[in-house]
Image (cartoon, helix red, strand yellow):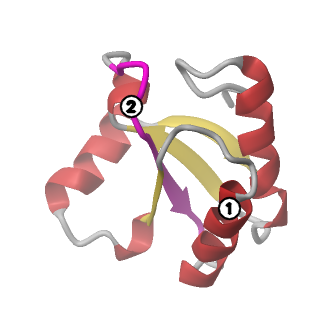
Amino acid sequence: MIHQEIFGIAPEYSQKILKLFESLPEGTEVWLFGSRAKGNYREGSDIDLAFKGTEVDLGNRDEVLIKYDTLFLPWKLDIVIFAEVEDPSLRSHIDRVGILVFSK
């Protein structure tokens, strides 16, 4: 099931953020993890996202981050490419608590 929101962020801002992912390659999933996925976030907590998919790469991540900067939102956006995450504990965390917020 895809959640159409990012926890702790007003729906209108969540939708602006989710719209940034429309340019990602087919087969890409975007997973929310960290404090916002666990529900223990604070007002200024960053937004942790993982891109999963065989075609998604750092160029796609950078493109999304550049577009995000034009929105002038107050939260820091951190994006990892899941396939490139070497830390087993981070991979496990994303798999355990991750919430699917976008799929193409």
* Residue 71 placement, left or right of 93: right
The residue stretch that appears in magenta: 41-53
Question: What residue is at 64 percent from the left and 37 percent from the top?
Answer: 101
Q: Which mark is residue 28?
A: 1
Measured along the vertical axis of the image, is residue 74 above or below residue 20? above
Which residue is disc 2 drawn over?
45
Instruction: Name the mark nearer the viewer: 2 or 1.
Output: 2
Q: Amino acid at mark 1?
A: Thr
Residue 21 lies, with reference to residue 33, above or below; the image says below
Is 50 contained in the magenta span? Answer: yes
Q: Position of residue 6 (x, y in %)?
A: 60, 28
Q: Secondary structure at mark 2?
A: loop
Mark carried by residue 101: none
Q: Position of residue 41 (x, y in %)?
A: 35, 21
The quadrant of the picture occupied by the C terminus is bottom right
The residue lying at 51 percent from left, 39 percent from top is 75
